[in-house]
Image (cartoon, rainbow, N blue to C red):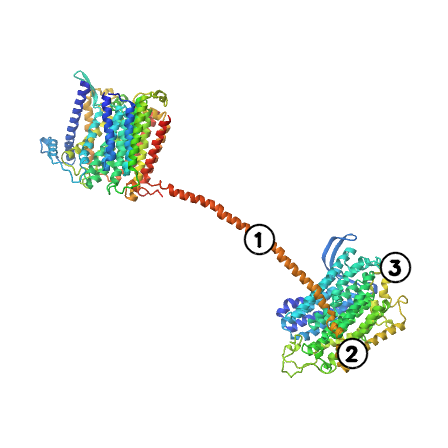
Amino acid sequence: MSLIWLVPLLPGFGAALNGLLGIRFFSKRAAGLVACVTMGLAFGISIWAFVGLLGLAPAARAYDVVLATWIPPIPLETAHGIGAFEAPWGLRLDPLSGLMALVVTGVGFLIHVYSIGYMDGETRGAYARYFSYLNLFCFFMLTLVLGSNLLVMFVGWEGVGLCSYLLIGYWYEKQSASDAGKKAFIVNRIGDWGFVLGIFLVFFTFGTLDFRAVADAAASMPVEAAGFGTLSLICLLLFIGATGKSAQIPLHVWLPDAMEGPTPVSALIHAATMVTAGVYVVARNAVLFTHAPMVMQIVAIVGVLTALMAATIGLVQNDIKRVLAYSTVSQLGYMFLATGVGAFAAAVFHLMTHAFFKALLFLGSGSVIHAMAGDQDMRRMGALKKYMPVTYVTMLIGTLAIAGIPPFSGFFSKDEILYRTFLDNRLLWALAAVTALLTAFYMFRLMSMTFFGGYRGPAWQHGADAAPGGGHGAGHGGHGAWHGPHESPRVMTVPLMALAVGAIVAGFVGVPQALWGNNAIEHFLEPSFTASAAVRGEAVAGGADATTDAARAETGAEAAHEEGGAHLSRGAEWGLMLFSVLLAVTGIWIAWRNYVVRPQVAASLAERFAGPHRMLTNKYYVDELYGATFVRGTLDGARGLWTFDRRVVDGAVDGSGWITRLSAWISHMLDTYVVDGLVNLLGWVTGEGSYVLRRVQTGLIQNYALLMLIGVFGLLTLYLLTR
Amino acid sequence: MVPITPAHYLVLSASLFVIGVIGVLVRRNVIVILMSIELMLNAVNINLVAFAREWQHVVGQVFAVFVIVVAAAEAAVGLGIILAFYRNKETVNIDEMNLMKW
Amino acid sequence: MIDIVVIPLLKIVIVLVAVLAGVAYLVLLERKVIAWVQVRLGPMRVGPHGILQPIADGLKLFLKEDITPARADRWVYTAAPIISLVPALIVFAVIPFGRDVSLFGTTVPLHIADINVGLLYIVSVASIGVYGLILAGYSSNSKYPLLSSLRASAQLISYEVAVTMTLVSMILMAGTLSMVGIVESQREAGLWFVFAQPVAFAIYMIGGLAETNRAPFDLPEAEQELVGGFHTEYSGMRFAFFFLAEYANMIVISAVAVTLFLGGWLRPFPGVDALAFLDVVPVWMWFLLKIFVFLLVFLWIRATLPRYRYDQLMRLGWKVLIPLAIANVVVTGILKVVL
Amino acid sequence: MGEAIAFYSLAAFILGFAVLVITARNTVHSVLFLVVNFLFVAALYVMLHAEFMAVIQVFVYAGGIVVLYLFVVMLVNLKRPPEVHADPRRRGRLGLVVSGLLLAQLVAIAAYSTTQAAAGPASRALAPSPPVSGNVEQVGWLLYTHYLVPFEVASMLLLVAMIGAIILAKREL
């Protein structure tokens, strides 16, 4: 547990090694080995730390490590007079961060291993570059997760954004890839703007950035039930950042395009870890959010709407990865819904399970794409079951998990969320339920189109023609011909199996009491979502409303096992479970009927509801909308400014320069024709005059003497006349 | 016969002076011109000495001495110039000494 | 009337005749002396021991044809000998031969004129003499005479400076320009100035030799180089004139030297009364005696010394004598002020 | 009477020889005439009881300067005659006329001045009258007392002239 600081630094070290030396010197094997070994070690250390954490008493489950002081205390103005603005390189291990670290390192490790096989087609330098990026991402992600204050967290936050940009644009030769990278980066900036403002406001309000301190300070403040106060503002800003990172409405547009990156990247960053950072932030600041119920409502609504919208879009997408991307968006929506209704534990629980099965699904799809030599269109797949059984089985497990079929992990987490939503708001529950149905449907649509039915892909001659679709992701791009769909190498299938196991068992940490389990994860996570005990006590002493606030704040974490309060009878709980399972089964049945038994029905439906279909395929025209408004507005504004700059500013500059030149020219003319003219005139006059006068200068001395004599004569005459 | 008054000496020296002037103005031989200048100086001296006699005071002779000194200096330098010029242009004709002109 | 016109005329005639005769016999004397020095006999034919030799020479020259070279400048050619002879003779006008003597009841000063600028008169007249040489050389339209005349005049002018300087120092000693005054001042001083001014005397002697173109400074008539000097083209009486002028100049130099340095007509050591018995000898005898001695010295030097080279001549004149003379003048002046 | 004779004869000689000086074709002749002219001027000085001036005239002019002229003439005159090449722009006749006018004017002034009372006594105060007797003594006295500075300046002038003449006449320094 004291080695926790190694958890982020090991991947960082690997990244540095691969980035500085690997690109030039390492072989593929060496580069992959470095990355995987560092991640594996980080995984082991985090497991060990986690075990150590479990060994402690629930109240004392927190361990701080301060590596160094980043910013020495600087006196700054805050709400309560001058506060010391300081930021240590501090890491904190507590249940939440421990769990997150476990997820990140574990899934990350598996995906690293998977990448060794998947990226086999790349050249040596690019291979090392890929792994250094991946390690760098893990480093930043772990910094984000383990950071003990908002600033360190923000470092990780921006770092993962950077890595996401780098990895989406990994194939930067492809215009679409680099565009997607830029899009993701810019959209994230919008969110980060809110996040930074939130950090400022947090410091201004509480005079500190440490989570624990912030939580304790916030716990002693009244719940802004009625008005929209400082805490609400903080939460809203942080939530804006979360939406940016976690692709919630309205900033969800970047995630589907992010699928331009390599599939393992999609699995790690855009499914398992980074996109869940937003959820993590909200959960990390649970106390703040519980004191801002209005913002909680907003979060819940945004979440559920995102879930529904993404699910509907997912219905009609044909790109296998895009389907998964939209499902990711929708699952993230679920998580925010959970946080919105105060079920932070459920959110984190779903986050964990989702990390497993969604990573599994992505890797599986990657395997499929690998098999199809880079083709991602499901309409050209089908009947791959017999070619790649391992992929089929694992993906089936993942699909069942996401669909919420017991006893797979997705069932527990999603059911928990639905249950808590039902308790909180019926309308939201209805929408979430519809989303669940749609989820089951489009996931099995994916499965059917991919693995069942007849093969619709291109024919292949044995070892004859080159791979269609350029095969940028194709492991076989390296050795020419495509031999048709086939099972992936072991280095890829083993992680699939591991994740499948995870997808199955991960749910059992949160079996509800209704199923005679004790919601272990909730109890485990509880300290992370509440203020420290001392603060809670004095908050209770602080007065009636404070107590009610505290009580209300703790419902989110404790209602599940509290007798009384907002609670349902066991029967009702059972009913809800059955209903949700029923929904999933219904979705599965529809998908089976439409895409396996009678595939033509789907087409006919698409024709009958052409309008909605087109709208869905075009993702509600959100991109077009943004393109028309923000992008176009920005571009036009920029162009306008540019024109202004060129016309007015440059015009002014050029004008002044022109005026200068004109005046210079005028003075030049003046100089040339007036001043020089006078001088030349003088010289001319002198010269011409000398032409006349020099006649006298005969050089004859005696003439000069004669002139002298005449002068003497004249003088004498004058003398005589004047005396 | 009238007594000899300074006027006589004046006329004499004037005539001598004018003769020197004519020599300067007419002759083209530089040496002769210099000699004419000597004549003019002598005319001056005659005047000086005559008036010294008239006034019974030798100051005029003193001036005459200075005049002679000047004449000596002038002769020396002038003849040196003539020699130098002659070495260069093989002539003492003053009409050919007209380099200093436009 | 007598003492204004007759006596001066008599004196002039006497002096001229004496000088010319002296010149004539000086030539003979020279020939004899040099002959004796060279252990010869010299002229012996005409008269006993050649006594009448000068007369014979005179007659010869007088009767000789007078030749004028073609394309010679006739007027100048004629004038040159006269110009050279006349100054040499008129210098005697201011030479005092002795104290006033009274004969026939009238006191007669033994000098033709005693002007108060006597010394300057001598110098200036001597400076006129140079024209004779130059014009002779120029007018005879022949290169040897021209060269020699240029040499002679250059030599004359250069040494004239030194001699004049010595005369200046003598004037400082005597405090007057009049020759008689100088002699008188020596008598009052009681000693000849030669003892007071030995340097000036030496310079004057050398300068005198040079001015008279005598050996060892007889370059103008160096027979070996220039056939005969500036009077090569001359013959007959004109040549005689040059001849007379040269020897007359010797006598002039001697006379002036005697007057300035050897006390003129004074007996030796005029300040010492013990030698008063020497006064039995008449003063003009003393004078002539001193001149005779001088002339002997001249001849003696000629017979003894070789001729100078031209550059040596000039160096001696400009770099030795003139600075020495100037220094002498300065020292004399300082002494006159101090004493 | 005798003075008048002496003056007129001397004046006649002086002017005559002066005219000869400037008219003689042969330069050497004109030099000779100049000498004679100077000698007659010296005689005039003697007549004016300026013996010192007379001797100086003979000594310096006749014995020094003119000899210099003669040398230069001999050095220069042996080549072609200098009278060739007459420059037409030279105004010789005009010079003659103006000279004549000047002479007339000067004579007029002289004649006019005789009618005026001589302004002698006033001017005599120019310089102190020497306490010594005798021409040379008086001149010397004035030169070395009242005109000492001009005398020294004159000596300087002579020195400068000598050096300048040497520099000019020497072929190579």
Q: Quadrant of the C terminus of chain D?
A: top left
Q: CA distance from mark 1 to mark 2?
A: 73 Å
Q: Is C308 left or right of A433, judged from the image as shown?
A: left
Dot 1: chain letter: A
Q: Are marks 1 and 2 on the same chain?
A: yes
| Quarter holding residue A581 | bottom right
- Comparing labels 3 and 1, the label whose residue is closer to the camera: 1
Q: Using the image, tell me which numbered label, if any, was put on residue A488.
A: none
The residue depicted at 16 percent of the width and 24 percent of the height is C13
Q: CA distance from mark 3 to mark 1?
A: 73 Å
Q: Quadrant of the N terminus of chain D?
A: top left
User: Label 2: how many residues lie within 10 Å, few (<14), some (14-19) or many (20+)?
Assistant: many
Q: Secondary structure at mark 2?
A: helix
The amino acid type found where label 1 is placed reads Gly
User: Label 1: how many residues lie within 10 Å, few (<14), some (14-19) or many (20+)?
Assistant: few
| Quarter holding residue A520 | bottom right
The residue where tag 2 is placed is A591
The residue where tag 3 is placed is A547
Image location of residue C165, percent across then percent down: 29, 30
Q: CA distance from mark 2 to mark 3?
A: 50 Å
The amino acid type found where label 3 is placed reads Thr
Dot 3: chain letter: A
